[in-house]
Image: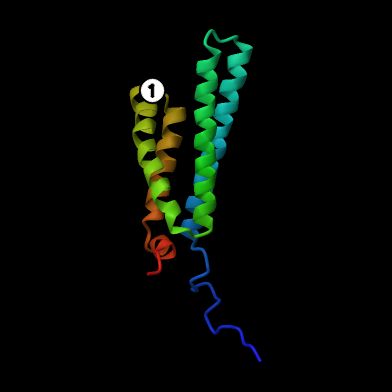
Amino acid sequence: MTTAPAGPSGPGSRSAIPGTLRTAAGIVAVQAAALAIVAVVVIVLAFVHSATRLWAALTVAGFALLGAAVLYLCARGLLGRRPSSRSPVVLLEVIALPVGYSLGIQAGRLEIGLPVLASAVAVLVLLFTPAARVALDREL
């Protein structure tokens, strides 16, 4: 006779994903989608406006698509509660802070810079909440 392991399965259990972690993963997924859209727009503009340096535009779009893929995989890692996904997300969000500042404040493009800045700050705050930290802690 086999029995199921006796462990908590309610909202406070180890297997439940905290709301802060779910929200952070959602924001990271939105960032990935936005970056993919930017890549598509760059590709379309490069062909429509007959760019003199098509290779440069395609290289920028390629890096944007690579960044979108990394962000998407990080979002999946957060939802899967993989501790190894926290460091890349924190690094990318810390990199996004000066990008958002320079776009929004220095370049005067608030419509682009503020969402980048706000989403980066939101993800960093959400990832360092106690619930998210506990959910992503490694078991030793």
Does 47 appear above or below 12? Answer: above
Residue 71 percent location from the top left of the image: 50, 42
Q: Position of residue 33 (x, y in %)?
A: 57, 38
Classify residue 46 by image quadrant: top right
Q: Position of residue 123 (x, y in %)?
A: 42, 48
Instruction: Give amino acid for label 1.
Output: Gly
Q: How is the image coloured?
A: rainbow
Mark 1, residues whose alpha carbon is within 10 Å: few (<14), some, or many (≥20)? few
Q: Quadrant of the N terminus?
A: bottom right
The residue that disc 1 covers is 108
31 sits to left or right of 134 = right
The quarter of the picture where the C terminus appears is bottom left
Residue furthest out toward the bottom: 1
Residue displayed at 62% across by 87% down? 3
Q: What is the secondary structure assignment of the residue under circle 1?
A: loop
Could you tell me which residue is drawn at 39 percent across and 32 percent down?
100
Rendering coords of residue 127 (x, y %): 40, 54
In percent of the image, x 44 and y 42: which residue is there?
Answer: 119
Q: Against 13, is 42 above or below?
A: above
Residue 31 to residue 74: above or below: above
Q: Nearer the viewer, residue 137 or 11?
A: 137
Q: How many marks?
A: 1
Seen from the viewer's position, the closer of residues 35 and 110 is 35
On screen, residue 119 versus residue 50, left or right, reads: left
